[in-house]
Image: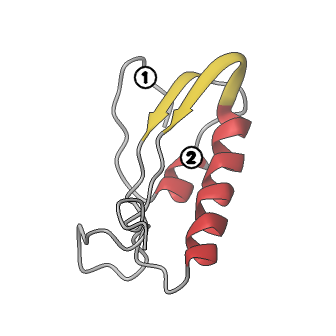
Amino acid sequence: ESMEINKIYQGNTLVVLKTFEDNCIDMILTSPPYFGLRSYSDNKEEIGKEEHPQDYINKIVEITVECMRVLKPSGVMFLNVGDSYGSHRD
């Protein structure tokens, strides 16, 4: 499938990103589900449902590496990340 301008792609992030050519995206704006905050589906593979925070970080890094592959050298990426513990200081 060839890429279209201004099209929304939906699916497993890594699977979808791997269908894109290198250096083909101008801008990435993403706010992945925060670790342990809420569930959006029954899918155990869903980001944020990892058993340990380090597993969550590893998944975000894996996705970010793939995002950087598809991002043009002149492109920009915005990644908004938090966690369910951010509001609990004790």
Image quadrant containing the C terminus: bottom left
* Residue 80 rendering spot, x and y as whole percentages: 46, 41
Q: Give the residue displayed 45% in from the left and 54% down from the top.
A: 82
Direction bottom: furthest residue: 51
**Contact (Cβ within 8 Å) of mark 2 with mark 1:** no
**Disc assigned to residue 55:** none
Residue type, numbered disc 1: Glu
* Residue 72 rendering spot, x and y as whole percentages: 70, 21
Q: Is residue 7 above or below residue 64?
A: above
Residue with the mark numbered 2:
17
Q: CA distance from mark 2 to mark 1?
A: 14 Å
Q: Is residue 60 left or right of residue 36?
A: right
Q: Is residue 66 above or below residue 52?
A: above
Scheme by which the image is coloured: secondary structure
* Residue 83 rendering spot, x and y as whole percentages: 43, 62
Q: Give the residue displayed 63% in from the left and 24% down from the top.
A: 24
Q: Give the residue displayed 41% in from the left and 44% down from the top.
A: 31
The crowd level at tag 1 (other Cα within 10 Å; few <14, some 14-19, many 20+) is few
Q: Is residue 11 left or right of residue 57?
A: left
Residue with the mark numbered 1:
4
